[in-house]
Each structure stands twice: as structure tokens, then as C-alpha cells.
Image: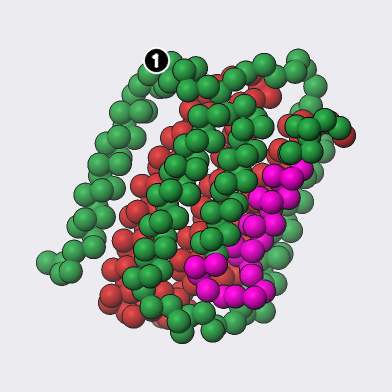
Amino acid sequence: MDLVDILFYVFAALTLGCGVLVIANPLSRNPVTSAMFLVLTIISMAGLFVLLHAFFLAAVQILVYAGAVIVLFLFVIMLLDLKAEARRKIKIYGLIAGLIAVGAILALFFKNLISTSPNGGSPPTIEGTTEALGKLLFTGYVLPFEVVSVLLLVAMIGVILLSRKKLE
Amino acid sequence: MHVGLEQYLTVSFLLFALGLLGVIMRRNLLVIYMSLELMLNAANLALVAFSRFNNKLDGQVLVFFIITVAAAEVSVGLALIVALYRRRQSAHVEDLTGLKL
């Protein structure tokens, strides 16, 4: 087992452990702690991206998710008064329904994973550097790129419209 | 054991399952939103792993678009939650029964 494999297991354990603490923290129901553990999940997932040689995406993941999305979440948590929400308990039938659904979907996933056994073939050589990704983005994927920029503009206008004080 | 595609896919599946469990189990709109982000991230991890082990960069371009769309989705969704909170004084799904007969 070399260093890369050990790092994979460390980052995978961090990702999954912090993911559990996002959805069900035994010590605190406060959404702020959930948001903080979501930051940790995202940063360890950026580590997994680095191990997969997707360097540009690792940087974008930290910039966009940890930098922008989580800050937005924290702003909204501070804006809403969630003191009363924090004291509510998790319903037991919700837990049972969730476990049944999740068990079913995991069984489906792992059945497919075992029956296909995707490993084999040549060892990977690809590098997700900014240069390679940028070349692909501005040659083969120009139209989706422009459409996404329009989508961001529409989302921005929509958010301004939604968060006005009065909707006429 | 050498780390290959299977290990990455297993992490991705487990993370997706955690997000799904959070969406079904939790009753706070904000935490449900965070669980949705977990599910999107699980899909991102699977796509990056496929891209690496198939020697094609297209998966990573798709992840780039997913991150952009997720950012737009979060901003619109949080604006909706704030508007809802202004009207109902609650961000809890059990208090939002306007569609119930």
C-alpha cells in the first residue's frame, strides 16, 4: 500500500464521517454545526479530487462550495431564527422509511458494482489540469458553457426578484 | 489493496445514500438542502472517478457544469426559503401543509 492509497482511505473516511455528522449529529440539532461539517465534507472531497488528478476541479470545489455556497447557507441560517427548530426530535417513522429506501438503493448499487467489476484495462494517464480542461471547455463545450452563463444570470435576477420585501 | 474505480464508486454510493437518508429523515428545510448538496457531490465524485479511469476529460467538464448549476440552485432555493420564512415564520416541513387536503 503506497501513500496515495493511504491518503484515499483517510479522505474517504473523513468525507463519510463528516457526511454522517451533517445529517445526524448526536450532540447538536443546530443547522450551523451541519453547515460546518458540510464544509469539512467538501474539503476532504476536494482531497479525493486531487488524488484523482482533477486539480482544477479541486480548486473550484473549495472556491465555489466552501467559499460561496456555505457562506450563503450561513447567512440564511443567521437571517432566520432557528432556535425553536433546533429542539425538535427526529421522527422514528421517518428514520425507518429513510433506512428502507437507502438500503434498497444501496443494494441496487452494490449488486451492479459486483456484477460488472469495472476494473481492468490500462492504468489511467489523464491529468485534469486547468489547461487541458480549458481547451476542452472552449472547443467542444462552448455552447453549454454559454448556456450556463445565461442560467447564472437568470438565477441572479430570480433571486433579486424573490427576495424583495413585497411581491406585487 | 490497490485503490481503483470500485473504491471511489463505493465512497460515492455511500455519500449519495447519506444524502438521501438526510432528505427523508430530517425535517428542517435548510438541513434538507445541505443533504441535497451531499447527493450532488456524490454524483460529482463518481463522474470524476469515471473520467480518470476512462482516460477522458468529458466527465470533468460535466462536473464543472454541475457545480455551476448547483450554485445557481442553492441561491434560488435559499431565496425561496427566506421568502417562505417571511410569510409563515417557519422553516420546518411539517408546518408547511398548504397542499394538504
| Residue B71 location (% of width, % of height) | 40, 47
- Subunit under mark 1: A
Question: Which chain is rendered red in the image?
Answer: B
Disc 1 on helix, strand or loop?
helix
Pick whichever, A39 or B90, lies toward us.
A39
| Residue B49 location (% of width, % of height) | 65, 32
Please report the residue visible at 39 percent of the width from the left and 15 percent of the height from the top.
Answer: A139
Say if the magenta span includes residue B72: no
Badge 1 local density, few (<14 within 10 Å), some, or many (20+)?
Answer: few
Q: Is residue A120 above or below residue A117?
A: above
| Residue B43 location (% of width, % of height) | 58, 42
Question: Which chain is rendered green in the image?
Answer: A
Give the colour scheme shown. Answer: by chain
Quadrant of the rendering where the C terminus of chain B is positioned: bottom left
Q: Is residue B44 above or below residue A81?
A: above
Please report the residue visible at 32 percent of the width from the left and 63 percent of the height from the top.
Answer: B80
Quadrant of the rendering where the N terminus of chain B is positioned: top right
Where on the picture, by quarter, is residue A70? bottom left
Please report the residue visible at 86 percent of the width from the left and 32 percent of the height from the top.
Answer: A1
Label 1 sits on residue: A139
Say if the magenta span includes residue A21: yes
Pick whichever, A105 or A87, lies toward us.
A87
Pick whichever, A29 or A119, lies toward us.
A29
The residue at the far left in this view is: A168
Amino acid type at circle 1 is: Thr
Span of residues in magenta = A9-33
Using the rendered image of the protein, determine whether residue B94 is visible from the camera's viewpoint. Answer: yes
